[in-house]
Image (cartoon, helix red, strand yellow):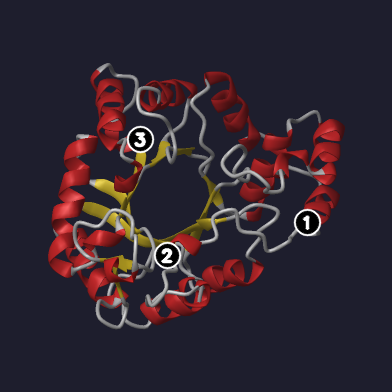
Amino acid sequence: MLGLGTWNAPPGEVGAAVTAAIKLGYRHIDCAAIYGNEAEIGEAVAGAIRSGLVRREDLWITSKLWNNAHAPEDVAPALQRTLADLQLEQLDLYLIHWPVAFRPGVLMPESAEDLVSLETLPIAATWAAMEVAVDGGLCRHIGVSNFGMATLYSLLGQARIRPAMNQVELHPYLQQKGLFAFCEAHGVHLTGYSPLGTPGFASGQPVLLEDPTITAIATQRGLTPAQVVLRWALQRGTAVIPKSVSPARLAENLAAAEGELAPEDMEAIAGLDRSHRFIDGSFWVKEGGPYTLENVWA
């Protein structure tokens, strides 16, 4: 349930971080094609397996389909590129990265012309191709990322293979209680990304790890603020994928899985919810385009 996130992990550092994480005991590694570092991660994973540090069957490796490969005929080639980069025969989990579609070849949209509406290219069509990838043994499980309740509910009604996971931004400032309850009721697991907020990523944002409630609990329990936040997420029943390239921080994060917070700590943190998104999805909203913040997070 406590994995290593690799988003924004710098090239030249992420491979060493993956190796260090595996040595420390991490067994869940979260990747994505758009992160641009899967080849380096693949080298590190392959090296760890070759050296006997870990067996492939002990690892859980996730990757994600980027928005420019939603067309059914593009899903398998995208997955095969990821498998080649990661030097794997099969993923444990493959996710639709966003409920947003681009024209083929577009990495990031610059205008409405780069976007494709979900009426033109429905999620259900992309999902059917993901199901074929499971049938073909390219991945064991499939799921989604950044899906709100309405989008997920619609997919559940059309899926032959139910989504195993919804990976979304989750932390004490964005607790997503409605989505949490919905996923629990429908047997969909949740993974929280940016579980520590996004320190240093965007100026002017609140700093979760400096919240007085979090720091007070950390002091009282002999934990770091990061350990408090990660333990809160795990105790809630969600997986978490904090990112770090520092071995000391990797060890600190992993130690959060040992022990539990007191009920009064959980209650205090439950009161911190601000519905604040650090990753707000505004980069998909283009003048004249098909996406709004309302329909992205529907």
State the residue position of label 3.
58
Amino acid type shown at disc 3: Asp
Q: Quadrant of residue 89?
A: top left
Q: Earlier in the sequence, mark 2 or mark 3?
A: 3
What is the tally of numbered marks visible in this picture? 3
Q: Is the residue under label 2 in contact with that under label 1 (CB below 8 Å)?
A: no
Amino acid type shown at disc 1: Leu
Q: Quadrant of residue 47?
A: top left
Q: CA distance from mark 1 to mark 2?
A: 28 Å
Whether residue 6 can be seen here: yes
Amino acid type shown at disc 2: Trp
Q: Secondary structure at mark 1?
A: loop
Q: x, y (%) of residue 155? A: 37, 77
State the residue position of label 2.
284
State the residue position of label 1.
272
Is 168 above or below relative to 298? above
